[in-house]
Image: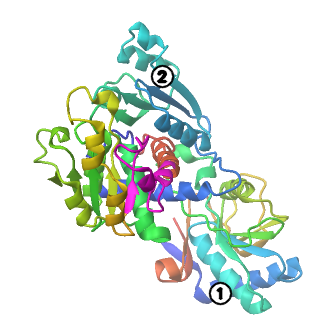
Amino acid sequence: MSARTVLHAADIHRALTRISHEILESNKGPDGLVILGIPTRGVTLAHRVAALLTEISGTPIPVGALDVTMYRDDLHRHPTRAPHPTEMPPGGIDGKTVVLVDDVLFSGRTIRAALDALGDVGRPSVVRLATLVDRGHRELPIRPDFVGKNLPSSREERVNVRLDETDGTDEVTIGS
Amino acid sequence: MRHLLDTKHLSRAEAIRILDVAEDMADTQQREVKKLPALRGKTVVNLFFEDSTRTRISFEAAAKRLSADVINFSAKGSSVSKGESLQDTAQTLQAMAADAVVIRHAASGAPRTLATSGWISAGVVNAGDGTHEHPTQALLDAYTMRKRRHGAGSRGRDLEGMRVTIVGDILHSRVARSNVWLLQTLGAEVTLVAPPTLVPQDVSDWPVQVGFDLDAAVAEAPDAIMMLRIQLERMNAAFFPSEREYARTWGLTTDRLAALPDDTIVMHPGPMNRGLEIASEAADSARSTVLEQVTNGVSVRMAVLYLLLSGSNENED
């Protein structure tokens, strides 16, 4: 059970700052942006990204949470998962540019579920994907638009994201 | 969770889990697309040996919103009227690969028999059995009280300190029984008010206070008052002299409504006998939660079906 820290607090902050700039660059400004986090840690990251975007652009950026539990394709393979709240920002997502935020991108199945969930909530004009860590091993044709760190890993390794708001510390570790 | 048979054996944590998942289900029902794919490919059978419209369509709506297939089976005009036993009916459902059975039966304990007999492997939900329990009704009542009390901050909370008065035919009421156990588990104080003839013979081991005077109970200013339906189909003995006298002595009249505090909520599991146990003014007032209870019923039943059917059974206890 040895775990190695691959991102420290300052690294995480730098990565999120860069992602925020990239989001503004690709969207050509803050217009129509909506940031949606995928529970649980994706929501925390989404709030940080939205705060950074607001700070950089000077425009308040709406942020929310999108629960994907009931859209997963592996529900019957695991013990019952309790859903999390979905919170849509007041302006909704119709016609907006939605940036989905998750902590670790792995098989891509969570994102597939998120795209289905999104379709039931509204119809954004564009959907982008931001992830703090991309560890590879995709099982579906899904690709992130904004990546904090590409982290080559073996399937058996565990990538753990801990965040101040939920875990009392900011770090990303990898271990067996 | 494998089955939901009663509230008496439901722990506080299990009850709050169901109510919290119901909150999430309620949120999804505000959307344009209300259907969720969580139970796609599962089959839910509504096995109703007693007449029921509300509970059956509530379960049907809940199952359909989760994308399960629903088969409705009512005893009237079915093989049961030809004398088929519960065992044979159950084994037929097993052969059709039902994943959950929602059962209402006139015999107390029928759902437990179904769940423990080994006739079927499906999860069993009790939708009312004899004079025993009606757990989803109690859960939706608790959900409604919690929502009125805590609003958006309801998740994770119980009903500690709430004072609830249940009025009417306690003797025949499975709703009252389920509520008594669940409310006690969630920390509420329960008072029962009924004509002496409609109180069960021995309630000494129930965690409740029993009174016979509705005006005294109203003067205590409860947080919620729940009026039970006088089930005219069960009034097979002289339990009270006349309907008029019942309405005057144990009904929620306009005068009693006025005597209640403004924030007391008025509940009724439906269908209502207006003018008998509840006056129209009370049923239609802003304090009444009758329609909220119906809406919440779908969310609570979605939560129960989801918790029963979505996970793998092997990994659970």
Does residue A100 appear in the picture of this structure? yes
Left or right: where A122 falls relative to B204? right
Q: Label 2 lies in what chain?
A: B
Q: Residue at x 34, y 24 (%)?
A: B118
Residue B38, compared with residue A25, is above or below; it is: above
Q: Residues within 10 Å of mark 1 (few under 14, many from 20)?
A: some
| Residue B45 part of the magenta segment | no
Q: Which residue is mark 1?
A: A13
Name the quadrant containing residue A94: bottom right
Type of amino acid at the residue the image marks with label 1: His
State the mark number for residue B74: 2
Left or right: where B266 falls relative to A52? left
Name the quadrant containing residue A89: bottom right
Q: Main secondary structure of the magenta part?
A: loop
Magenta-drawn segment: B265-294
Residue A50, compared with residue A1, is above or below; it is: below
Instruction: Measuring from the top left, give residue B252's x and y in whole percent.
Output: 33, 53
Q: Label 1 lies in what chain?
A: A
User: In what quadrant of the picture does the N terminus of chain A appear?
Assistant: bottom left
